[in-house]
Image (spheres, rainbow, N blue to C red):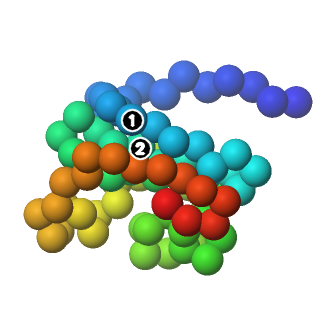
Amino acid sequence: VKTWTELKFSTKFLQISCSGESGFTVAIAENGSGWSWGKNSHGRLGLGHDDDCHTPQEIKFFAENQEFLVQIEAGSEHA
């Protein structure tokens, strides 16, 4: 049985892309930061590990390198 859970989250997303059958999602926040969540096979979420994440997690690489996203897309095996 699937149930919906409301997330109390202060970050606002400007763009969200779902991979469909691969089960992960990527997003751009209004400040240009990158976020990801879902199935993390082979580390495809870009979080530095391969554990699945059920809530949005910031992709630290972009902030650490002072890079900001303007577009994002999730494919079957990539983001």
Q: Secondary structure at mark 2?
A: strand
Q: In terms of depth relative to the viewer, which is nearer, 3 or 32?
A: 32
Q: Is residue 37 visible?
A: no
Q: What's the residue at 43%, 67% (across, down)?
A: 47
Q: In terms of depth relative to the viewer, which is nearer, 38 or 19?
A: 19
Q: What's the residue at 81%, 30% (across, down)?
A: 2
Q: What's the residue at 25%, 52% (across, down)?
A: 69
Amino acid identity at mark 2: Ala
Dot 1 or dot 2, earlier in sequence: 1
Label ID, residue 15: 1
26 to 9, vertically: above or below: below
39 to 43, vertically: above or below: above
Q: Secondary structure at mark 1?
A: strand
Label ID, residue 33: none
| Image quadrant assignment for residue 15 | top left
Label ID, residue 27: 2
Counting from the top left corner in percent of width and height, residue 72 is at 40, 49
